[in-house]
Image: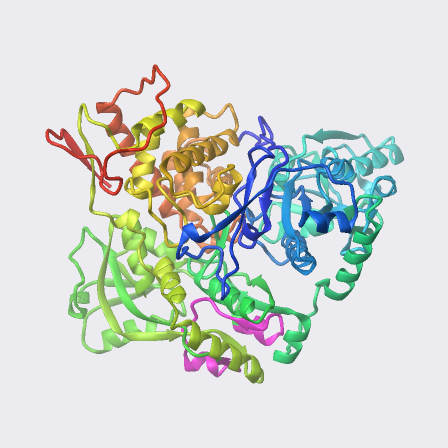
Amino acid sequence: MPSRYKGAHFPGATMFAVALLALLLVAACGKPDRKIEETAPAESPVAADETPEAPTAQKRIEFTNYIETGDLAALKKRGIIRFTTFSSPLGEQLPRSAIVTQRHIELATALAKKLKLEAVWVDAESPSHAIALVEDGSADIIADNLTVTEEREKLLNFTQPLMHIEQKLVTGTRGPDIDDLQKLRDVKLLVLEGTTHVDTAKRLIKENPDANITLQEVPYNDDLDALMDLVNEKPDQASILDSNEAEGMREYRDDMRIGASVSEKENIAWGLRKDSKRLLTTINNYLTRNLVTERTDRITDWKEIKKSGLIRFLTYNGPTTYFLWKGVLMGFDYDLAKAFADKHKLQLQVIVVPYDESLIDWLKAGRGDFAGASTTITDVRKEQGITFTSSYMETPEQVISNNKRPPIEKVQDLSGRTLTLRPFSSFLPTAEAIRESGIDVEIKTAPPGMSISQIFNMIADGLLDATIADTGQVKIEASLQPNLVAGTVLGDPKPQGWMVVTKNWHLLQNLNKFIEEFRQTKQYQRKYAAYFEPDKRFTQRIRARVIPGQDLSPFDELVKDSSLNYDFDWRLVVAQMWQESNFNPKAVSPVGAQGLMQLMPATAEEMGFPPPVFEPDRNIQAGVKYLNWVRDRFDPTLPTVNKLWFTLASYNAGYGHLLDAQRLAEQLGLDPNVWFDNVEVAMLKLAEPQYFKKARYGYVRGSEPVQYVRKISNLYKAYVDVATGDVSVRPPLRKPETDPEKPASGSGAREEVTE
């Protein structure tokens, strides 16, 4: 697999509003004269994925970066505080317990709120670039994993330490012995340029002149997985990482080893300009009072939770609980937990429990305050020493099978069929009750490592007959995989709730009150639909009409203009636009994506188009610009056609999930540079715990990007047959005159392509 360092694209310093950081961004690109949106305060907390009630009610503020070298008084006069970061693009990485980027973001966000300043983030390419931005007045604070050194102290003032780290040697599973510095020999150190690790590597070489240690400085890239992949290419290679970064990566990678420390304890702190003494004092006082230190396991009730300002939620990374999608943290359980924390002005700390470990065990050990992952309320669980909240959802069970076999429309149709269920599944008693009622159904138990997603995939492939799952899962999977068909509903809906330890009665009361009130809101109804009702794009019965001699869409001229700017075939963009919105410029997805190209507001903001972006011309410009930005992130040597499919998959699911799929494809012996029948296979497997628990970006409902690319590619081929791709003269921008909510139509249709 080609290294992702080749042809790497490093966007310049860009700005984005902290209001969009909470459930965060797809990465940065654009120019520094961008506009920044400020969302009007809501009466009640609304998660970042919330469908906007009235998008036109949003207000905007203009922001153009400036040079400011003054102290706190100068910042207050401007009403803005500018943080800079050089880590992974905010929100692109699924936060795990040892990953610290989220911690800096939360602290900085709270600081800005306390100072009553609008927070803007400036994206830096490296630590040295971030220092330069602060020095010349283009940013005010470096809020990132910045190591304090003597040289840097000559340039900046540093706050009190946020944490202490060591530099560690790291290598691959077949790499050299790095456990003992005395035995370190014949090793090439691959180290990110512009970091303190370069100085450490040079010191090691100087101190061990006969050890044959060499140094290769790698162009700075915040994708540490790419660095580890590079290290793994040869058995004599190693690298140096900060201990917190290394431990964070080891949570999901089993192809790396952490070795000896190569530094003394070092401080991680924020950096400010030398003359910002008042700002430094203010931040230090704030950190003293509010710094969230690493907490030991605890079992605390409501009073202590309120005093700490932090509530810990235990959950799994999974399709309805907690996951990353298009750079946004999502999940039904996560959204509800975030709304509860916001209501009580608490910081929510999500702790992802390993998929093969018990939420109840972690809860009873004091590792979290409450827990849940679409957890069915059962007496068996209550007997383990926990208490359930009121039900936040009731879900019936339903059969799902392959559509090439007879449908299972009633319970009696299960006679002669085989149900495959996971070991210890809550659906096993239902299956056994059906068999005991006299219906001749065979019940098979899947191997312990097999997930429900894997069972769905095997049924779709015809390898298994049928299974039982929650109705929401059944509806969504049947809509995404054409070979699956939903069958009969079994029994009454079963309640689901969160868990607390029995003695936390005050916390339980507050959770119950929140659930009972929240369930009555429209916000709850929208969230339920977003996670448990099929996406209309995959269940639509409208047909995209392909008619020779007529426009493909009401927006062809607008698409041609933007496509010409970025060297895309305009017919491809039209095919994508149909898949995204059915040519409806007012379309809003359940998770808040807007307009013809279904852009997340944060993504539009990053492309220089402040939301809302429902106007066709702005939406298309932003969408094609983002499509180009995604395409530019791939290795330039990648074949053009496959780069196109990778770009579409990334547009749909997020660039990070595509990187995970490429890496997994290589591990499976597939071609990581070919989409169809290779990377798409790996993408499907990232819905299975045995694979996504080792992925940097975690769970992804892989069937969605797979179907997304297939549908667009099929429609694109149909468009190519009937419309020329030539754009000899740049067309003028114009507003479409046809009804935007209806696909182009007319007589003489040659063919219709079902979406």
Residue 520 showing in the rendered view: yes
Compared across the picture, whether 165 is left or right of 92 comes to right
| Residue 326 shows in the view | no
383 in the magenta segment: yes
Q: Would residue 718 be counted in the magenta stretch?
A: no
Q: Position of residue 3 (x, y in %)?
A: 57, 31
Name above or below for residue 241 compared with residue 534. Answer: above
Q: Nearer the viewer, residue 192 or 70?
A: 70
Outermost top residue: 728
Question: 116 or 314, which lies in front?
Answer: 116
**Which quarter of the rendered picture does the C terminus lie within?**
top left
Would residue 704 appear left or right of 74 to someone viewing this image?
Answer: left
Which residue, as the protein is rendered here, is positioned at the far front?
77
- 151 vs 235, left or right, is right
Q: Nearer the viewer, residue 342 or 479?
A: 342
Identify the residue at horizontal 31%, vertical 40% (top origin).
579
The furthest residue to the left: 748
Residue 498 appears at what percent x and percent y? Answer: 48, 73
Which residues, given as a range, are shown in magenta?
360-387
Residue at the image position 30 percent from the left and 47 percent from the top: 537
Display colour scheme: rainbow
Instruction: Give the image location of residue 571, x and y in percent.
Output: 31, 27
**Residue 550 at x, y = what percent?**
20, 26
